[in-house]
Amino acid sequence: MKISNAIKFFIDAFFRKGERSEFAKYISIKKISEALYPKYKFSSFGRIFLEDSNFVENYKKNVSTLDYSSLDRRYTLDQFVKQALPVAGDTAECGVFNGASSLLICNRIDGIGKLHHVFDSFEGISAPTAEDAGCAWQRGAFSCSEMRVRENLCAYEFVRYYKGWIPERFGEVQDRMFSFVHVDVDLYRPTLDAIAFFYDRMSPGGIMLCDDYGLIQAPGAKKAMDDFYTDKTEDVICLTTGQGMVIKSSHGSSTLRLG
C-alpha cells in the first residue's frame, strides 16, 4: 500500500462517523507502519499488558515518560521474576544502568526475605572487543552514578551494591544461591563472565534473563549465551522482546548452600 493511501485510511478510520473504535485505530497505525517500514511486523491487537495501568504508570515514572520501546521487555522481566518467587535464593542484576529493572525486581521480592545484588561499574559499559563486531555502543555508554541508583532504590534495604567491572566482585557472593538473575551488560566478555559465574549458583527452576540476546545492536550478548550453553542441559529461549531466557534444570550442578 502506498503511503498516501495508508494516510488516507488513517484519516478515514479516525474521523469517519462510527469508526472510532480502538480496533479501527490499531488497523490504521498498522497500515501506516506497513507502508513506511515493511520490515516491522505489528503484534496482535488487544494485548492485555498494555491495559495494565499500574505497570504503565510505574514505567512512565521510573523508566521513561517519552520512550516506550522497552515496555514489553520490562513487563516480561516482571513476569519472570514473579515466576521465580517460590524458587530458593536471592536475585541479582549485572548491568543496572539507572536501576529501573532492579526496581521492578525489588517490587516483586519485597517482604519475602530475599536479597537483591546489583553489579555495575557505574561508568558505563567497557570497550567492545572483537566478539562484539557490529555493536552499536561504545565504551562509557549507559553510564549512571551509583548515587543515583541508590536514590532510585532507596526504599529497599535488602539491596546490596558491588561497584566494579564484571567479574571483579562476584567472589563476594560465591556462597549464595539465586532464583533470578538479570544480565544486561551488552557485550560478549562481561555477559559470558556473568552467566558462567551464576550458572552453578542458580537453584533448580531459577531463571536467567539476558536483556540483549535477541537485539542486533548487541551481537556479543547472543554469542556469549550461545557459546556457554552449547554443552549444557538447558536451551536458550529467544523471546520476541529481544531477550534470551534460560530456566535452570534440576539436572544442573548446584552444590552451594542457600546462604
Image: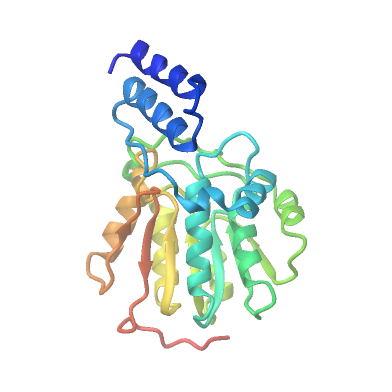
Q: How is the image coloured?
A: rainbow
Q: How many marks do you count on the picture?
A: 0
Q: Residue 21, image x and y in percent?
A: 49, 35
Asked if residue 178 shows in the view, the reply is yes
Q: Nearer the viewer, residue 143 or 20?
A: 20
Quadrant (top left, top right, bottom left, bottom right) of the C terminus: bottom right
Q: Residue 133, image x and y in percent?
A: 32, 38
Q: Is residue 101 left or right of residue 212?
A: right
Q: Residue at x 54, y 76 (%)?
A: 85
Q: Residue at x 48, y 50 (%)?
A: 73
Asked if residue 167 shows in the view, the reply is no
Name of the residue lying farthest toward the left: 231
Q: Residue 42, image x and y in percent?
A: 36, 37
Q: Residue at x 34, y 14 (%)?
A: 5
Name of the residue lying farthest toward the top: 4
Q: Is residue 137 left or right of residue 103?
A: left
Q: Residue at x 35, y 49 (%)?
A: 240
